[in-house]
């Protein structure tokens, strides 16, 4: 009996580590680095993360997401430092998989301490692309678009992202959001790596120029830690 219990616990741990954990992006939704994907945290699951971004003025971004159902999550984010902001986010994964993609729709609303308000609606699709003959290596591709408002300016912007899982613990992430809005911004470009330390703790490190929903003219290194349960 004890042996069966031990095997069951081991199987549970391996199952938890064999899939990429839901990681809350810099804007309070599960996703890549600053952009969303179509995943959600799952019913009654909770994920929180905090990152330090080393721009000219260092900032700390904390965020969390909770799964109300397997398809609906709510979350939020808060940034401390220059251009501080706080806000709420929600995402719903639709029960349809056209073209083999999971699809989700979501939205976020943020308020900055400098008085600027921003809102965003988005759609994102994510699907796996396994590598034939390569055990444990899978590429998850994401495509989508968001409609973003920043005070009186607005823009519809497409984005692309990729997450390469190198076995059960290591993940390489990249994303690009194209500058097609009417506000003064730059293309958002981020690259990072994530490592699973245990079934509940993960960490990430990388480079990004994301500041809220927009891309700045400066890239910053970031490092962070995530807790999921």
Image (cartoon, helix red, strand yellow):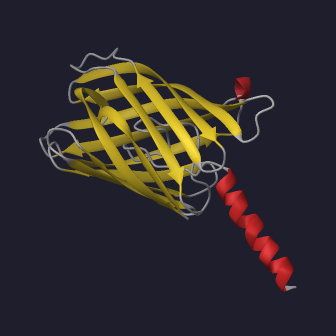
Nearer to us in this view, 174 or 211: 174
Q: Is residue 186 left or right of residue 74?
A: left
Q: Is residue 218 left or right of residue 166?
A: left
Q: Position of residue 9 (x, y in %)?
A: 74, 72
Q: Position of residue 24 (x, y in %)?
A: 46, 49
Q: Position of residue 99 (x, y in %)?
A: 72, 23
**Residue that appears at 37% across and 52% down:** 224
- Would you place residue 137 above or below residue 197 in this image? above
Quadrant in which the N terminus appears? bottom right
Labels in figure, total = 0
- Would you place residue 102 above or below residue 78 in this image? above
Q: Is residue 183 left or right of residue 57?
A: right
Nearer to us in this view, 133 or 138: 133
- Would you place residue 47 above or below residue 101 in this image? below
Q: Toward which corner of the image does residue 3 lie, by quadrant? A: bottom right
Quadrant in which the C terminus appears? bottom right
Q: Toward which corner of the image does residue 158 lie, by quadrant? A: top left
- Would you place residue 175 above or below residue 205 in this image? above
**Residue that appears at 39% across and 31% down:** 190
Q: Of all residues shown, which one is farthest toward the bottom?
A: 1
**Residue that appears at 53% across and 59% down:** 197
Q: Position of residue 69 (x, y in %)?
A: 61, 56
């Amino acid at each position: 009996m004890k042996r069966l219990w031990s095997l069951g616990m081991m199987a549970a741990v391996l199952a938890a580590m064999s899939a990429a954990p839901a990681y809350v992006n810099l804007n309070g939704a599960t996703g890549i680095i600053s952009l969303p994907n179509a995943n959600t945290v799952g019913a009654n699951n909770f994920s929180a993360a905090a990152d330090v971004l080393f721009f000219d003025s260092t900032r700390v971004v904390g965020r969390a997401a909770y799964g109300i159902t397997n398809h609906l999550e709510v979350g939020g984010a808060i940034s401390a430092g220059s251009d501080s902001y706080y806000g709420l986010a929600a995402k719903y994964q639709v029960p349809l998989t056209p073209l083999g993609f999971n699809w989700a729709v979501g939205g976020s609303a943020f308020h900055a301490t400098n008085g600027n308000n921003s809102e965003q609606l988005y759609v994102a699709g994510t699907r796996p692309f396994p590598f034939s003959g390569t055990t444990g290596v899978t590429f998850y591709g994401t495509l989508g678009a968001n409609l973003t408002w920043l005070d009186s300016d607005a823009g519809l912007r497409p984005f692309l992202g990729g997450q390469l899982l190198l076995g059960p613990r290591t993940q390489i992430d990249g994303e690009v959001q194209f500058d097609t809005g009417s506000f003064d911004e730059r293309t958002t470009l981020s690259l990072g790596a994530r490592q699973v330390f245990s079934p509940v703790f993960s960490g990430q490190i990388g480079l990004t120029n994301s500041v809220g929903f927009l891309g700045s003219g400066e890239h910053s290194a970031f490092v962070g830690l995530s807790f999921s349960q």
